Amino acid sequence: MSLLSIRNLSVRLGRGAEAPAILEEVSLDVMPGETLGLVGESGSGKSTLGMSVLRLTPPRLADGTSGEILWEGRDILKMRGRELRGLRGGEISMILQDPMASLNPVFSIGAQLTEALRRAGRSDLLKAAEAALAEVRIPSPADRLRAYPHQMSGGMRQRVVSAIGLAQEPRLIICDEPTTALDATIQFQFLDLLRALQEAHGMAMLFVTHDFGVVARICDRVAVMYAGRIVETGPVREIFRNPRHPYTRALLAAVPSTTAAPDRLPVIEGAPPSIGNRPEGCAFHPRCPLAGPDCQRQPPMETLAPRHQAACWRAREEAVA
Amino acid sequence: MQKFTFRAALVLLALFVLTAVFGPYLVEHDPLKGSLRARLEPPLWAGGSAEHLLGTDRLGRDMLARIVSGARISLTVCVVVIAIAGSIGTAIGTLSGYVGGWLDRILMRLVDLALSLPVILLALLIGAVSGPSFGNIVLVISLVLWSQYARMARGETLRVKNEDYVDLARTSGLGHVRIIARHILPNIAPALIVVATLQVGVVIVLEASLSFLGVGVPPPNPSWGSMVADGRSYVVTAWWVSLFPGIAILLVVMAVNIVGDALTDRINPALRGRTA
Amino acid sequence: MSAILSTHALGRTFRTRGGPLHALSDVSIECQPHHSLGVVGESGCGKTTLNRLILMLDTPTEGEVRFKGKPLPALSAAERRAYRRAVQPVFQNPFSSLNPRLRVRRIIREPLAANTEMSRAQIDARVDEVLEAVGLIPRDADRFPAEFSGGQRQRIAIARALASKPELMLLDEPVSSQDISIRAQILNVLKELRDEYGLATLFVSHDLATVRFMCDEVVVIYLGRIVEHGPADLICTAPRHPYTQALLAATLPADPDAPAVAIPPEGEIPSPLSPPKGCAYHTRCPFKRDICKTTRPIAQPAEGGGMIACHMVHQGGW
């Protein structure tokens, strides 16, 4: 029984099926307690997808949004004010890329934390706030309550944001590239923390990122996105070991590693299409080494193995050597 | 904003400029010479004649001719003031932002000083000392407005200075003058153009106010402001003498502000930059 | 001296309201012809300061930068122009490194006009040549930067650097703001150009994987000081300094079955305004000893080549 079920979500710049699409016919499920990664490059729509769940996309996209986002059977896209507001920060929380955008610079972090806890119905707010900071591994939590966001480092701020996000014991946390702006060692610790929090609270995570290393580290399943569509999805091990979509394969091959230094990196020619410039049929076919005439038609998502699906006419073929 | 509003404003502005440039050659009456016999004649639709479409003022001078000439005066004052205030302000602001340090601090205090000047009082003072003249009004208004350019130029210079391409120019060994000329000025220009556009309205109102007070463009020149002042005593009986120049001021300033707003919207996203 | 560019005990201290900020201390590196040196570090390590000192955008407070053995301040005007031709940078942000009001031709022409005696015709020919070398077309020279994507702009920036026929390219995180597929393209282009023109490179990055791909040798900097230096394959697979080990552990491989990290990185990066006493890394180091809190370790030759500054390693801790 999935926690979050997205069915045929399309987000377009304008009404009508002809308007340029940021997202097209996206369907996915998030199970309770699992971490689903959303991986893609610029223009893939991954951030828009993450923001769409809580309807935090710009208002001008509202007209062009169709499909269903089902949360425990209720369609989020049809929810009205109070119900939606209750969901935000309540059962579903978000952690964004820039912690300075999530934290109010004129209030102390103690003030912001206690406000979130009060909304969660907690009493004994100061103690609860201190405990929340300790849980996100902030040293000297009692002192930090009086600190202001600008007095803390980026990694610390993200932890505070996480503590606030957890205040109401959400069942799902949506993370939109929360570590992209952090240093590598800080990112490592933060991801570790997220995993620990997830185990302690049992929440599910939808993790938007462009970094396969991050996916490998903390995700259970991953969905690869290209030009507004999901092109492949499956368990992390399966996708990394046996990628079936040519784009996934190419992307995985293009990442340099510390263990080997090839002379050249395998490249995908060209660049991801911008919104409104999407090719007919499979959006990847102009850049695909396996492309054929049938790729002018959009391939459907095909199930190749339990929970492993790919949208490619050649998905069952072996990789090009 | 509504496309219609913007287009209408643009048309109005174009009309203003065309009137200012060509109008005085096209009207039949002399704005400076009046016939006392024809004094205070109402406009055509209020009982007047086709001879003077918009009526005449207290000295019998044709209103239409005077308004058209007044447009030229307003436009001229605008252009001269913006040229002077703009150059000085930009120079000071750019230098301030580029050099920084103590020079920046001193120049910005100068800006604060300029901003604290009471315009009208100053104009009255200068007017009292040397009498109303074209030069005085240009001087006073420029004195007040240069600081806006300085502020904007400084802010933009600081922003552009931080861009990598300026560092790269320095790495290539370019001198400061070349860097300012080729890299800084072209990139701060859009913002300054917006300031200039928005200032047109301010200049017109200031000029009109000062002329109204008698310390601006000297009579018998048909500045819109002094025309409004002239009609003060007959507002109830010969309402057209003050009303028409007043409407002219209103329309032009509104048009300028609308166009300036639209320009700001267009320039600002470009300034703030790119999509992530 | 055979090195094109070298720094000798280079240091830069800023006076701030919060006290002296030691952005860089005692940094000595050498860029040999045709050789590729990587500089790796996280925020606050001083990489940006190092670049600025090398590019003469700033002057050192200690030590010096030398061009073919001669300290920069001692260069004659002609030598300085030669330096500007020989050492060319490519910066991280492709949206900030090109003047939006100039056409690409003007942008590429500028360093040539300033530092060479080339005629207009020669410069134009060179512009076409370098644009093709980076995978663009000569017609692109007449367009404005806004008409290009991020990846293409980065290529233009590389073309500009190439135009002077440099001996050394200073690459400051040239790909970290790009998508994975574009990143791979640009890294390949850089490698190809390097091989074809025999360039040396100084590659500054925070990512050990990219540095492994691009470089022969790596220097690791922490809070303004070099902590380790050695061949790229060694540093990127079996580093000896605890900080490099932490950095390597934090370089997440695209492999869910990668072995678990034995020693995960801990702690926050201290502010350069108040660096820890003794060894700057001791506050985060799982191996710290008493001496680490009081005495700064001196760089000493390490096994496998290069140098390392760590008490534990010096004392045979492994």
Image (tube, coloured by chain):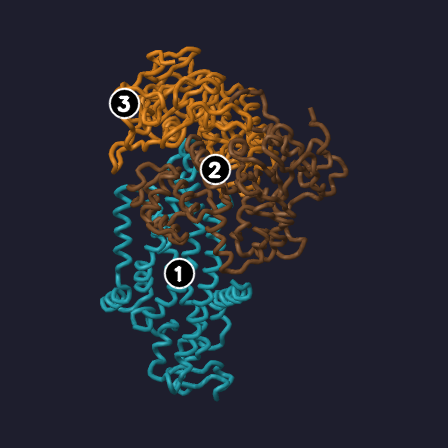
Chain colours: A brown, B cyan, C orange
Q: Which is more foreground, mark 3 or mark 2?
A: 2
Kindly report the distance in space between the C-alpha atoms of the residues bearing marks 3 and 1.
63 Å
Q: Is residue C182 visible?
A: yes
Q: How dense is the environment of label 1, judged by Cα within 10 Å: few (below 14), some, or many (20 and up)? A: many
Q: How dense is the environment of label 2, judged by Cα within 10 Å: few (below 14), some, or many (20 and up)? A: few
Q: Amino acid at mark 1?
A: Gln
Q: Quadrant of residue C223?
A: top left
Q: Amino acid at mark 3?
A: Lys
Q: Amino acid at mark 2?
A: Glu
Q: How dense is the environment of label 3, judged by Cα within 10 Å: few (below 14), some, or many (20 and up)? A: some
Q: Which residue: 35% across, 44% down?
A: A149
Label 2: which secondary element: helix
Relative vertical location of residue A168 with respect to residue B126 in this rendering, above or below: above
Tell me whether circle 3 and circle 2 mark residues in contact (CB < 8 Å). no
Q: How many marks?
A: 3
> On what subunit does the disc labeled 2 rest?
A
Label 3: which secondary element: helix
Query: To which residue does mark 2 refer?
Result: A199
Query: To which residue does mark 3 refer?
Result: C293
Q: Position of residue A41 (x, y in %)?
A: 57, 38
Q: Is residue C82 visible?
A: no
Query: To which residue does mark 1 refer?
Result: B199
In this rendering, position of residue A253 left or right of residue C70: right
Q: Position of residue C20 (x, y in %)?
A: 26, 32
Relative vertical location of residue C307 with respect to residue B274 in this rendering, above or below: above
Near-viewer residue (B25 or A39): A39
Q: Quadrant of residue A220?
A: top right
